[in-house]
Protein backbone atom coordinates (compact mmCIF):
# COMPACT_ATOMS: atom_id res chain seq x y z
CA UNK A 1 0.00 0.00 0.00
CA UNK A 2 1.33 3.40 -0.97
CA UNK A 3 0.91 5.68 2.04
CA UNK A 4 3.06 8.51 0.65
CA UNK A 5 0.03 10.82 0.38
CA UNK A 6 -1.58 9.76 3.64
CA UNK A 7 -2.45 12.74 5.86
CA UNK A 8 -0.69 12.91 9.22
CA UNK A 9 -2.02 14.49 12.38
CA UNK A 10 -0.61 15.53 15.74
CA UNK A 11 -2.01 16.54 19.10
CA UNK A 12 0.50 18.96 20.63
CA UNK A 13 -2.32 20.89 22.28
CA UNK A 14 -3.66 17.85 24.16
CA UNK A 15 -7.31 17.93 23.09
CA UNK A 16 -9.34 14.73 23.60
CA UNK A 17 -10.97 14.82 20.12
CA UNK A 18 -9.71 15.94 16.70
CA UNK A 19 -12.11 16.09 13.76
CA UNK A 20 -10.51 15.18 10.44
CA UNK A 21 -11.55 14.77 6.82
CA UNK A 22 -9.90 11.38 6.20
CA UNK A 23 -10.70 7.84 7.29
CA UNK A 24 -7.16 6.56 6.74
CA UNK A 25 -4.37 8.57 8.36
CA UNK A 26 -1.17 8.61 10.40
CA UNK A 27 -1.03 9.73 14.04
CA UNK A 28 2.37 10.99 15.23
CA UNK A 29 1.25 12.07 18.72
CA UNK A 30 3.19 15.32 19.11
CA UNK A 31 5.88 17.17 17.21
CA UNK A 32 9.29 15.45 17.24
CA UNK A 33 11.16 14.81 19.46
CA UNK A 34 8.09 14.24 21.66
CA UNK A 35 6.30 12.08 19.10
CA UNK A 36 5.27 8.46 19.48
CA UNK A 37 5.75 5.79 16.80
CA UNK A 38 4.01 7.00 13.65
CA UNK A 39 1.13 4.60 13.08
CA UNK A 40 -1.33 4.21 10.23
CA UNK A 41 -4.94 4.08 11.43
CA UNK A 42 -8.22 3.45 9.63
CA UNK A 43 -11.70 4.22 10.93
CA UNK A 44 -13.84 1.68 9.15
CA UNK A 45 -17.60 2.05 9.56
CA UNK A 46 -17.57 3.64 13.02
CA UNK A 47 -16.52 7.10 11.89
CA UNK A 48 -13.91 7.41 14.64
CA UNK A 49 -10.65 5.85 15.78
CA UNK A 50 -8.72 6.18 19.04
CA UNK A 51 -4.93 6.18 18.81
CA UNK A 52 -3.44 3.34 20.84
CA UNK A 53 -0.45 5.46 21.89
CA UNK A 54 -1.81 8.90 22.77
CA UNK A 55 -5.52 8.09 23.23
CA UNK A 56 -6.58 10.91 20.94
CA UNK A 57 -9.99 10.25 19.44
CA UNK A 58 -10.09 11.10 15.74
CA UNK A 59 -13.59 11.67 14.37
CA UNK A 60 -14.43 11.75 10.68
CA UNK A 61 -16.06 14.97 9.47
CA UNK A 62 -17.02 14.77 5.78
CA UNK A 63 -17.19 18.58 5.57
CA UNK A 64 -13.40 18.80 6.11
CA UNK A 65 -10.74 18.09 3.50
CA UNK A 66 -7.76 16.02 4.75
CA UNK A 67 -5.50 19.04 5.34
CA UNK A 68 -8.01 20.79 7.62
CA UNK A 69 -8.75 19.74 11.18
CA UNK A 70 -10.81 20.95 14.07
CA UNK A 71 -9.00 22.31 16.03
CA UNK A 72 -7.00 23.69 13.08
CA UNK A 73 -3.44 23.24 14.36
CA UNK A 74 -3.41 19.41 14.25
CA UNK A 75 -2.48 18.73 10.61
CA UNK A 76 1.17 17.76 10.03
CA UNK A 77 1.23 17.11 6.27
CA UNK A 78 1.39 14.17 3.91
CA UNK A 79 3.76 11.30 4.59
CA UNK A 80 5.95 12.13 1.59
CA UNK A 81 6.38 15.72 2.85
CA UNK A 82 7.99 14.44 6.08
CA UNK A 83 10.80 12.53 4.33
Image (cartoon, rainbow, N blue to C red):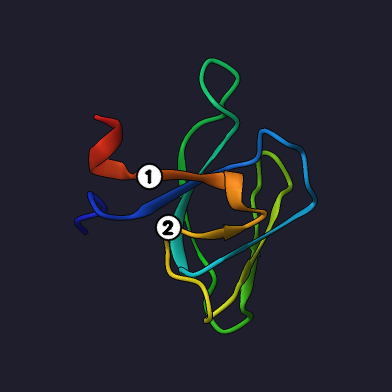
Where is 18 relative to 63, above or below?
Answer: above
Report how far apart the C-alphas of labels 1 and 2 lie in the structure. Answer: 7 Å
**Which residue occupies 77% across, 38% down?**
14
Residue 77's disc number: 1
Q: How crowded is mark 2: few (under 14 residues within 10 Å), some or many (20 or more)?
A: some
Secondary structure under the numbered disc 1 in the rendered image? strand
The answer to whether the residue labelled 1 contacts the one labelled 2, judged by CB atoms less than 8 Å apart, is: no
Give 56 or 18, whichever is nearer the viewer.
18
Q: How crowded is mark 1: few (under 14 residues within 10 Å), some or many (20 or more)?
A: some
Hey, which quadrant is residue 77 in on the image? top left
Instruction: Specify which label sits upstream in the sequence, 1 or 2.
Output: 2
Where is 11 relative to 6, above or below?
Answer: above
Residue 37's disc number: none
**Which residue occupies 25% across, 54% down?**
5
Residue 67's disc number: 2
Query: In the rendered picture of this protein, how many numbered marks are placed on residues?
Result: 2
Give 73 or 27, whichever is nearer the viewer.
73
The residue most toward the top is 33
On screen, residue 10 versus residue 66, left or right, reads right
Query: Where, quadrant-wise, is the N terminus in this rendering?
Result: bottom left
Where is 64 relative to 72, above or below?
Answer: below
Secondary structure under the numbered disc 2 in the rendered image? loop
Where is 45 relative to 74, above or below?
Answer: below
Picture coordinates of residue 56 (x, y %)?
71, 50
**Which residue occupies 53% across, 80% down?**
63
Amino acid sequence: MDTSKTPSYKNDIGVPVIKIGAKGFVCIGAEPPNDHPHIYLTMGDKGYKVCLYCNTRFEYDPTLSPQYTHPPECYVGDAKLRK
